[in-house]
Image: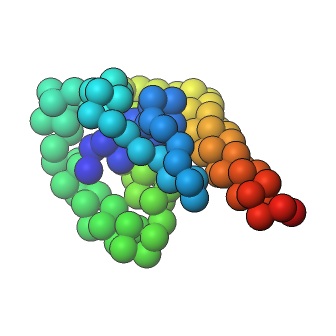
Amino acid sequence: MASLNTLTLLGAETVGRSYGGGMLKLEPREADRLPVPAPALVTDNATALASIHPGVRDALARGHLLGAVRLVDDVLLSHALGVTDTARASLVDAHARLTARRVARCANAASTVSGR
């Protein structure tokens, strides 16, 4: 659950590979380069992470990945690491831009193939 944070998602966009349909795939060597929370950070914040687990689970069950990420970001990025609201907003924006770029590239490729 701790890996559901904006920094890890941004890392996935930068190290992963984009395939048809806009799918993002991480090969094992690429996944090794993902920025994931250190075990000590997770351990130190285990109680706070456990307290948001129901909300994260519910957000994911409703298909709201970014809602789940926001909850984890509150605990790990803002509270534990002291990332400012401005810096956090920059990370969220960077992730959104890279995701949109990947999806748009897929849509452009699909329209080229279909002759549109």
* Residue 20 position within the rendered picture, expressed as x and y whole percent measured from the top left: 56, 54
| Residue depicted at 66% across the width and 51% down the height | 106
Closest to the observer, 39 or 49: 39
88 relative position to 34: left or right: right
User: Is residue 61 depicted above or below 84 in this figure?
Assistant: below
User: Is residue 81 depicted above or below 48 in this figure?
Assistant: above
Q: Which residue lies most toward the right here?
A: 116
* Residue 110 position within the rendered picture, expressed as x and y whole percent measured from the top left: 71, 58
Closest to the observer, 108 or 83: 108
Count every numbered label the image shows and give the total: 0
Closest to the observer, 112 or 102: 112
Examine the rendering and report whether any part of residue 59 can be seen.
yes
Corner quadrant of residue 50: bottom left
24 relative position to 30: left or right: right
| Residue depicted at 52% across the width and 48% down the height | 19
* Residue 116 position within the rendered picture, expressed as x and y whole percent measured from the top left: 86, 63
Examine the rendering and report whether any part of residue 92 can be seen.
no
Q: Which residue lies most toward the bottom here?
A: 62
| Residue depicted at 53% across the width and 43% down the height | 18
User: Is residue 26 depicted above or below 107 in this figure?
Assistant: above
* Residue 37 position within the rendered picture, expressed as x and y whole percent measured from the top left: 27, 31
| Residue depicted at 48% across the width and 66% down the height | 64
**Scheme by which the image is coloured:** rainbow
